[in-house]
Image (cartoon, coloured by chain):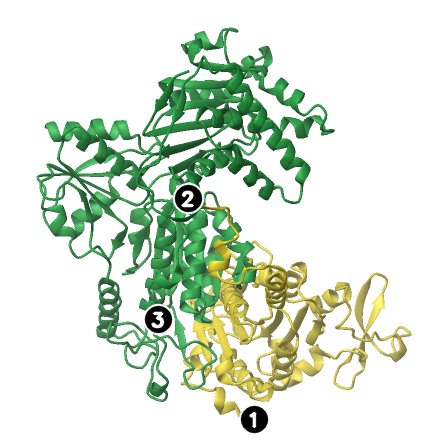
Chain colours: A yellow, B green
Amino acid sequence: MAYTNNDFKKGQPRWCPGCGDHFFLASLHKAMAEIGVAPSQTAVISGIGCSSRLPHYMATYGMNTIHGRAAAIATGCKVANPNLTVWQVSGDGDGLAIGGNHFIHANRRNINLNMILLNNRIYGLTKGQYSPTSPRGFVSKSSPYGTVEDPFRPAELCFGARGHFFARAVATDAPGTVEILKAAYNHKGASVCEILQNCVIFNNGTHDAVYSKEGRAKNAIYLKHGEKMLFGENNEYGIVQEGFNIKAVKLGEEGYTEADVLVHDAKCEDNTLQLKLAEMEWPVALGVIRDVEAPTYDECVWSQIEEVKAAKKYHNFAELLETNDIWEVK
Amino acid sequence: MEIKEKESVVVRFSGDSGDGMQLAGNIFSTVSATVGNSISTFPDYPADIRAPQGSLTGVSGFQVHIGAEQVYTPGDLCDVLVAMNAAALKTQYRYAKPDAAIIIDTDSFGPKDLEKAQFQTEDYLGEMGIDADRVIACPLTTMVKDCLADSGMDAKSVSKCRNMFALGLVCWLFDRDLNVAFNFLREKFAKKPEIAEANIKVIQAGYDYGHNTHSSVANVYRVETKNKVPGRYMDITGNKATAYGFIAAAEKAGLKLYLGSYPITPATDVLHELSKHKSLGVITVQCEDEIAGCASAVGASFAGALAVTSTSGPGICLKSEAMNLAVIMELPLVVLDVQRGGPATGLPTKSEQTDLLQALFGRNGESPMPVVAAASPTDCFEMAFAASKMALEHMTPVILMTDAFVANGSAAFKLPNLSEYPAINPPYVPEDLKGSWTPYMRNAEGVRYWAVPGREGFEHILGGLEKDDKTGAISTNPENHDLMTRKRQAKIAAIPVPDLEVLGDKDDAELLIVGFGGTYGHLHAAMDELRAQGKKVALAHFRYINPLPKNTAEVLKKYPKVVVAEQNMGQLAGWLRMKVDGFVPQQFNEVKGQPFKVAELVEAFNQIIKK
């Protein structure tokens, strides 16, 4: 059965005008329609925060739960019913501060969840405190003299937790967002999608370099597995290896030619270069950065149940009782 | 040789943590149960991870109470104390009756052993004031070595059989049929028959040693069996019975069983037990923390499973947020609290009833939640089943309280027949409501319908924010919040629970004893003792705490004197005072981490009667 965006839409979003959440929501509806899983077979689970309001605008099953616990709740939901397609939606505070532990363990276990991280580097719902992705020195209501702590880099956290899928898109870039959401769905296992989005009220301009199409043409690189990593308005730049590192170069300068440009390999099990790509400040890497197959927790739970069922002779409560030392009183 | 006919006998096996006292105790209780004796057991193990061998802190005990008629507790003091080393004698003698028989391994009472056990002289019996006539002193280690000299086993394996020699000696003391023990060992070591046979040889040697050498010294006890309830039985601990109750409930409801948990003493055995039973489709997830244990269970419940999370008090602190989510989303969930000593890390291996008010009130907002408590190891099965049924049929989280005492204690469990248990019917949303259904639509009992994901036409969003009663959308409307608060409260208040049962002199008691949960056996035994002394006494023991049984006020106000006895500072008494106008009970409170002593209860209750 074919679905349209409207089959996944519900209600009137209450986010501020211009908030990145609006853009992302539209892309999610579109991606779900293109993926084609029925709304009744889909669960969207969020925590707390501006972006965690999102399930209320979905015509699927879902929960807008408690702060930080979305990944843990989604884990139980997916393991108990692996037939459901489960999307977990969190902001940077929900997912990486109060929910950081669940974020890393969902990745480590490789639960087959599509994990969306809407990163605006600020706490919006509580009106403007710094978040664990705010840069050092960031001035906010709770850091009037600037923060004295370093931020998380989400990809680093994901990879550190042995994550197998990481992709990035800019909220205003609908095709780019839809593309990674579909890739996340198609990836079996925990799939982290970092969405760079603006908070017009409390952190306006945080992703300005890549927020417009023109900006992305200059400052972003769209990675495609198996393709040379070229970027720039006329593909005049490329990513090359330099010693133990990678760097962006202009072709034709310093003797670099297209032949020197690296080919992106999202399927490489070793994540060293993928991490370097994810952490580049210029250009900002967009698209699927890492996409490596591995056994998923939920599948393994159920296959283990089937194996044990075949190996053991008891399959109901009455038979379980008989496995004990029993005596009879006459 | 004198044969003492006894109504009941208590045996305490004690030794180093690695001495296998629990196995010896388990076999002895099984052997006794097989002849129809009533049994109750209690392990008392140290909190130390691994105390030095032979040290005072490394001693663990396992107490077995066997009776001709029903025994309700593992017993206050023992008739027979087995002390496998000097430290065990030193620390465990206080649990022995003044005329108790004491079995010691003299090989473990050398100068070094005595020093580790902090004896001052070599006359350890004299130091303890123990009459040597009551002591069966045998060079147990030497005899085990001799017995297994030809077995080809290494010294360590031989030493591991010492517990079986003690068991053989105890079996002789109680005139027990060794064949049951032999069968038990052959099954336990089915894959290592040489180990089974070595153990069997040692039990027989212990038995023969008693018969040949000590027949003139010690008493031989005989505990006959009266009032046998025919049937098939197994020995079960409270934690295992709890796990079985969840399995039974899931099967009865036709649902998958999901446990989200994090290891914590003394609840971990529930996780262990359920993890074994994948062949029944049981899903267990050992989560990253207590929070995720509960949160993942909420997710599993949303997905349509019978969801359980198991923990002890410190875990409840962490789970309360997700429990509250289940309250407002009105999803079924069973939260098991195996209580231990608190606050904070407190006494991890010891037993208390100090989480009651936490269970009732430990959440933000108006957050009504049913609370039930198991009265004994076998009652854990009944209450786990009841808690699951209540959660599923009333769409609510339910707290099931047990404690370290009932969780680790064991008793003979008559195999239940599931067909005799009530059906479990969750309020699934009827198909004909498709199109008009909203998430907070309720049935006649005020219970929200359950629409499990996967059903087309019932897609909906739940959440932690207050919802509109009619539409299910987020609402901050003041009248709606007041209405929803009242509806959640009314739903829990309307849950039917059995009437409070009054035992003993229910018509004319001068004193009503009131308790809840794991103290049932001790309170019952105290009542029996007082009635045997000619006092008029009754017992009302709560298993359903929220909502309270309908006849609670009537029962509590019927008797001239009421004492609420509990292992906390008066939490049940406070709850009852809150719920029953004008009820002012006397209180008996003790927070020692140990089970009540029946003798102490009897003395305290006698004082109240006299006043």
- Element assignment for label 3: loop
At 65% across and 65% down in the image, what residue appears?
A155
Instruction: Bin the neighbour count of mark 1 within 10 Å (Cα to Cα): few under 14, some 14-19, many 20 and up.
Output: few
Q: Amino acid at mark 1?
A: Ala
Q: B144 and B398: which one is in front?
A: B144
* Residue contact at pointers 2 and 3, CB within 8 angstroms: no
Same-chain status of marks 1 and 2: no
Q: Residue furthest front?
A: A330
Q: Amino acid at mark 3?
A: Asn
Q: What quarter of the picture does the N terminus of chain B occupy?
A: top left
Instruction: Bin the neighbour count of mark 2 within 10 Å (Cα to Cα): few under 14, some 14-19, many 20 and up.
Output: many
Q: What quarter of the picture does the C terminus of chain B occupy?
A: top left
| Left or right: B424 in relation to B158 | left
Q: Which residue is mark 1?
A: A2
> Distance from label 1 to label 3 (Cα)?
36 Å
Spot occupied by residue B403 in the image (x, y as percentages of width and height): 38, 43
Q: Foreground mark, 1 or 2?
A: 2
Spot occupied by residue B536 in the image (x, y as percentages of width and height): 13, 35
Q: Residue furthest right?
A: A255
- Element assignment for label 2: helix
> Distance from label 1 to label 2 (Cα)?
54 Å
Q: Which residue is mark 3?
A: B425
* Residue contact at pointers 1 and 2, CB within 8 angstroms: no
Q: Chain of mark 3?
A: B
Q: Which residue is mark 2?
A: B407
Say if B592 sits above or below B303 in the image: above
Spot occupied by residue B519 in the image (x, y as percentages of width and height): 30, 40
Residue A111 placement: quadrant: bottom right
Spot occupied by residue B281 in the image (x, y as percentages of width and height): 53, 64
